[in-house]
Amino acid sequence: MSHYFDRDADPTLSQSFNLSYRFHEMTFTLRSDQGVFSHRHVDDASDLLMRSVHPKPDDSLLDLGCGYGVIGLVMARYYHAQVTSVDVNPKAIALTQLNFQAYNLEAQIILSDSFSALQGSTFDWIVSNPPIRIGKSQLYPMLRTAIEHLTPDGRFIFVMHKKHGVASAIRFLEPYAALEVIQKAKGFHVVSCKKH
């Protein structure tokens, strides 16, 4: 069975469709398809995450594990951030490209297994609803590596449910960053990390 975090996923958009998402006063129409995370609607965790991030215009922002691109698209269109979107899934990259093109917005949209294609890059913001189903052995190094890719005053903001081990993830990251839970809703915690 193919997963949304599968680098060998079929990039063909075989059953793509439009979905709608409202962020403050803006409505977004997004192209989606089977084989990407939360493909039928913007999930509660990603919605909470986006409402917790406030970049300044032209801040550099990485959407880590972008899926069909909603987080990066919102940050580019609403806040005018300079967005880089990465995902390991070729279908996610194809959808993200379509969604940015639909709004005539520019972004660096890169097929990458976590930070593999981003060596030497740093960002003012790294934002992620991480793929917890990859397991701690892959997830925790990804979270730690995000902190290493921050600018000196940068923030890594991620969302995780308490049932999925957010407390454990926070404990793991404490040696590497100053952490703060900045938002909670429906069991989800939005965590802000700033490197020491």
Image (cartoon, grey):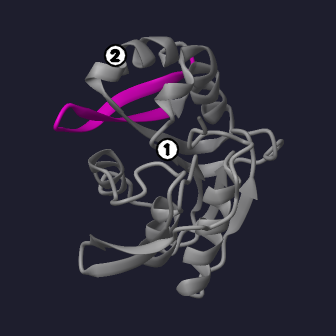
Residue drawn at x 16%, y 37% as measured from the top left: 186
The residue under label 2 is 167
Q: Is 116 in front, or is 181?
A: 116
Q: Quadrant of residue 136?
A: top right
Residue shown at the point (36%, 50%) measured from the top left: 46
Q: In which quarter of the image is residue 168?
A: top left
| Mark 1 Cα-neighbour bin, 10 Å: few <14, some 14–19, many ≥20 | many
Q: Where does residue 190 sit, x and y in percent of width and height?
A: 33, 38
Q: Quadrant location of the N terminus? A: top right
Q: Which amino acid does label 1 sit on?
A: Ser
Image coordinates of residue 191 in percent, x first then y, are 37, 34
Q: Looking at this view, is 10 or 147 the one in front?
A: 10
Side of 140 relative to 148 (left or right):
left
- Position above or below: 172 against 5: above
Q: Is mark 1 on a helix, strand or loop?
A: strand
Q: Is residue 121 above or below residue 23?
A: above
* Mark 2 vs 1, N-terminal side: 1
In magenta, the rendered stretch is 176-193
Residue 177 on the magenta span: yes
Q: In the image, is residue 130 part of the stretch drawn in magenta?
A: no
Where is residue 52? Give x, y as percent: 32, 51
- The circle on residue 128 is 1
Of the 4 image quadrants, the one containing the C terminus is top right
